[in-house]
Image: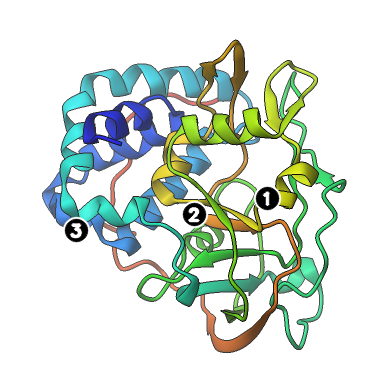
Amino acid sequence: MTNEEKAQALLSSPAGCSFVLDASENLHLGIDRIAEPDASFWLASSAMDWCDVHAGAGWRERRSMTLDSARDFADLALEIMSSPQFAWWYEPLDLGNQVWTSPQMIRGSLPADPALTEPFRPERWRRPSPPDQDADPVPDTSVQGTSTLRGSATSEVAAYAIYAADHICAFPLAAWRVQFEQEVRVFEINHPADWHELCLEFPHCAPDGRLVPDWRAASEQWDGVHLTLGGALSCEQARYEADGQWSMMQFWHTEETRWLNRIAATGERVPDFQRQPHDLSGRLRRFPYGFKPGK
């Protein structure tokens, strides 16, 4: 995938557009600083929260305005994608740094060994209900979702820290590093075309006519699906059409891997994640949309 294709995909998603717009307000920090995981995670989580369909009244107007506003920042999107410092956004799954976290107030007591201990049941689909449409079915994976540790945080922890989208928890977050004891087959998603490919290969037609993956069928060929950070910012709410079908990923708000099958693995306890104020939180600025939902 070329840098031009990455930039175009970023601007096809309201989340990607929001990231670019917020980046434009923080260029005083330097592109390289924005590319560091802590800043990228914070800005990506803020972008996901801004365009989330559950963010309140006026989300359609907010989405439209975000897409329209970003048209003037195509050069910045290309600059971001052309910088070698952002290459990690698209790196394949790093099995040695997968972390599972437990939102204690939601999922109850901590398991002694949380690493993918429950068999996946593909027929159990979580179906959020955004206004006027059915959501993408996504695998109800319970403990079977991991995020990549970079520095002192993960994309998922960053989302919990600012309560982005539907990421609500009580800190501290207990965490385990997953130690895999078998080879795993992982499908990588970096671009809306990758999601569409998965939908075409294992098709299931949602009530609104879009294709979504048949997770039961997908689990026969793949053990997990890894959404990179670049993929998350490019795919969220980005309609993609090919081969006479259309698809659109929703509600995968972070870099993460959803595990579709039981995996032989153990968990190594790592220090709890604390909800500490981000060292950039007082300096990172949001794009001045001038829009108040519901007004």
In the image, is residue 49 above or below residue 149? above
Dividing the picture into quadrants, the one containing residue 91 is: bottom left
- The residue identified by callout 1 is 221
Dividing the picture into quadrants, the one containing residue 85 is: bottom left
Of marks 2 and 1, the one in the foreground: 1
Can you give x and y, in whole percent of width and height, for residue 37 in the image?
A: 32, 62
Q: Is residue 287 visible to the viewer in this orientation of the structure?
A: no
In the image, is residue 87 above or below residue 4? below
In the image, is residue 96 above or below residue 294? below
Within 10 Å of the Cα at label 1, are there few (<14), some (14-19), or many (20+) other Cα atoms?
Answer: some
Seen at 51% across and 63% down, the residue is 161
In the image, is residue 66 above or below residue 104? above
* Left-right relation of 263 to 120: left
Which colour style is shown? rainbow
Give how far apart the Cα atoms at labels 2 and 1 are.
Answer: 21 Å
Seen at 66% across and 84% down, the residue is 266
Q: Which mark is residue 255?
A: 2
Can you give x and y, in whole percent of width and height, for residue 261 in the image?
A: 74, 61
Give how far apart the Cα atoms at labels 1 and 3 are.
Answer: 39 Å
Of marks 1 and 3, the one in the foreground: 1
Secondary structure of the residue carrying numbered label 3: helix
* Left-right relation of 255 to 126: left
Q: Is residue 3 visible to the viewer in this orientation of the structure?
A: yes
Within 10 Å of the Cα at label 3, are there few (<14), some (14-19), or many (20+) other Cα atoms?
Answer: some
Q: Which mark is residue 33?
A: 3
